[in-house]
């Protein structure tokens, strides 16, 4: 019975990967922001940073729901 329950449990690897990618992105953004006060510099850069952030958050949320 216990082996059946263990086999039925979903893998948490997608959540760990998505959450890890989001955490790494946050650290990279803060490091760049500390070195360059004018980061991201222009409207296009701002949009790209926001788009990447939104996509990473959406992926992390989806992975959390799917593996939960």
Image (cartoon, rainbow, N blue to C red):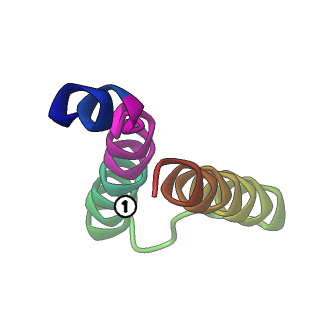
Q: Nearer the viewer, residue 62 or 1?
A: 1
Quarter where residue 41 is shown: bottom right
Q: Is residue 26 left or right of residue 3?
A: right
Q: Position of residue 29 (x, y in %)?
A: 40, 59
Magenta stretch mostly in which secondary structure? Answer: helix
Q: Is residue 8 left or right of residue 65?
A: left
The span shown in magenta is 8-21
Q: Nearer the viewer, residue 19 or 34?
A: 19
Kindly give the residue lying farthest to the left in the view shown.
Answer: 2
Quarter containing the C terminus: bottom left
Residue in view at x 31 percent, y 45 percent: 20
Quarter containing the N terminus: top left
In the image, residue 10 lies in the stretch drawn in magenta: yes
Q: Nearer the viewer, residue 45 or 4?
A: 4
Q: Say what secondary structure mark 1 lies in.
A: helix
Which class describes the residues within 10 Å of circle 1: few (<14), some (14-19), or many (20+)?
few
Kindly give the residue lying farthest to the front in the view shown.
Answer: 1
Residue in view at x 58 percent, y 62 percent: 61
Q: Please tell me whether residue 57 is drawn above or below residue 55 in the rendered image.
A: below
Residue in view at x 30 percent, y 29 percent: 4
Q: Position of residue 7 (x, y in %)?
A: 33, 25
Q: Please tell me whether residue 51 is drawn above or below residue 46 in the rendered image.
A: above
Quarter where residue 14 is shown: top left
Q: Position of residue 44 (x, y in %)?
A: 82, 57
Q: Please tell me whether residue 11 is drawn above or below residue 49 in the rendered image.
A: above
Residue in view at x 32 percent, y 43 percent: 16
Q: Position of residue 5 (x, y in %)?
A: 29, 38
In the image, residue 9 lies in the stretch drawn in magenta: yes
In the picture of the structure, the residue carrying the numbered disc 1 is 26
């Amino acid at each position: 019975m216990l082996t059946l329950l263990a086999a039925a449990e979903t893998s948490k690897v997608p959540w760990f990967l998505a959450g890890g990618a989001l955490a790494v992105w946050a650290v990279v953004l803060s490091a760049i922001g500390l070195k360059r006060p004018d980061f991201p510099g222009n409207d296009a850069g701002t949009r790209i940073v926001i788009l990447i952030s939104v996509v990473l958050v959406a992926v992390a949320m989806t992975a959390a729901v799917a593996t939960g």
